[in-house]
Image (cartoon, helix red, strand yellow):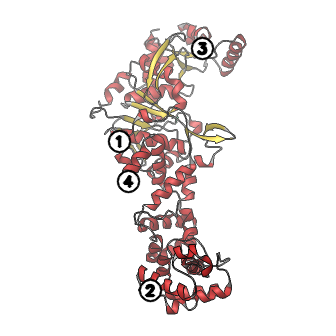
Amino acid sequence: MTREESADLLLPGVKHDYSYYENLYPQRNLPDGAIVTRYAPSPTGFIHIGALLQSFISSKMAKQSNGIFFLRIEDTDQKRSIDDGVNKIIRDLEKFDIVFDEGVTKDGDKGSYGPYTQSERKDIYWAFAKKLIIEDKAYPCFCSKEDEALDREKQTAKGERTGYYGYWARCRRLTMEEVIEKINAGEKYIIRLKSNGNFNRKFKFKDCVKGKAEFPENDQDIPIIKSDGLPTYHFAHAIDDHLMGTTHVIRSDEWYPSIPLHTQLFTMLGFKVPKYAHISPLMIEDNGTRRKISKRKDPEAAVSFYHEKGIPNHAIMLYLATVTNSNFEMWMEQNKDKDIDDFTFEFNKMATGGTMFDYDKLINISKNYISKLKATEVYDMALDYAKEYNQDFASLLEKYKDYSIDVFNIEREQKKPRKDIAYFSDAKNQTWYMYDELFKVKDYDWQKINDKKEIKLILNPYFDDYYDMDDDKDIGFNKMKDRTERLGYTSNMKEYKANPDNYKGSIADVSMVIRVALTTLSMTPDLYEIMKLLGVERMKKRVEMALQ
Ligand code: GLU
């Protein structure tokens, strides 16, 4: 039996020879330096923050180099795939402006390098596995899981490296006759790589993020086609990234140790080895030790966590950009009118070890981001959030649309905007007192002046005799000063500091009484703006309530 015949026997029914696929896919015509890269998830569920970071980096690197970013679905481990998993991934990423030029979409494949779903590429993997068998670079293996476990025990007992290699790679030694006999007897088999590596030999490698390193060669005869006929991740990675024209494999650094194997696979298949960029994971501190943020253990690993909190997606992107390149934050400080897309990311400015996940920093970024939005944008976002999580508040926002925009506009759209809202689950907390429907008083936070009679003196008849809606800020302030002096307080803070005993208090104490009466709170944004929005009638009612 020839090698070709044995390859046909092992992998029967392959429609095309590997050269068919080599010729099928056109050369990519892209400018110099263009990065072709991909996001290649297994459709196992929702996107988590680490995956978001990785897809963010990949999309940015492709986009800024006028390259191509595509989505490939790696579903060869069929046990792990979930229903609608692919659509969930696409939908989740879209919210973060991560869109693909090519690959799997909601309406099928887009692009000339498909199919982009691994389970649809079986014929392609088999064609290349056949090529390896014919070239004596792959062989069938009939060992069972139990055989392998037994060997591992022996290896451990002898203090040897575990795995299927060298002497331990027993199916390497099967003759053609033995192979045929086993196949005819219906024995199950997988296809293994016939590794040409020597563990005692080292080779040099340069990762775009981690830099230069030296690795021992791979000498393990790893499985390339599993008993269900589907490829292993390693084999599919080499075939797909070769045929799809990937220039840079940007992926999580759990794959970094696979470099020896992957470069070997590319080489043995006769492919050019792509560049690799291994992205460090986000870490979290747990009982004094650092560990990778975990989908199972950490609520903040799920992107839905931020959604429920009402942190805008763009704020999360800004945080990820900050995490990605050490100089992004400073650049953003110096380029306040620019956005993420104006920044050029560089592999060599990415963290080589783990990056600490800093929740407080994320909140701070979100707070700053929201503070710079227009009142109408804040309104829209607050409404979107409330519609999902607080229908009552959403109804109020809709009922009083213009008024609500004015409320969000207090101390906004100015040089130093107020930073009250850090996430939208807090929007109601920050504004409730501006809505009569929500103004249910429990407590008044009176400060220095908390004597009922004195409070009454200050408040009555302030709104009849002094306050006028049409006054500008200065006139309003002068009237408040006048009122203050008449009551035996002073509006001269310097004078007050020098001789506090000469006065009942200062203008600050007087305006505090007004603030608390109107809002119940001792800390609010600008009182003048609040008063203007409340209007005389509502203020009078609130004063009445406060005096009861
Ligand atoms: N499916 C692999 C994973 O989810 C992809 C790794 C890669 O990007 O090559 O880890």
Q: Amino acid at mark 1?
A: Lys
Q: Residue at x 56, y 43 (%)?
A: 357
Q: Which residue is mark 2?
A: 469
**Image x and y of residue 387, in percent:** 53, 67
Q: How many marks?
A: 4
- Mark 3 or 2 closer to N-term? 3
Marks 3 and 4 sit apart, C-alpha to C-alpha, by 70 Å
Q: Which residue is mark 4?
A: 336
Asked whether the beta carbons under mark 3 and mark 2 sit within 8 Å of each other, the answer is no
Q: Image height check: is 494 above or below 82?
A: below
Q: Which residue is mark 1?
A: 63
**Image x and y of residue 69, in percent:** 38, 39
**Image x and y of residue 480, in percent:** 50, 84
Q: SS class of the residue under badge 2?
A: loop
Q: Amino acid at mark 2?
A: Met
Q: SS class of the residue under badge 3?
A: helix
Q: Amino acid at mark 4?
A: Lys
Q: Residue at x 52, y 87 (%)?
A: 483
Q: SS class of the residue under badge 4?
A: loop
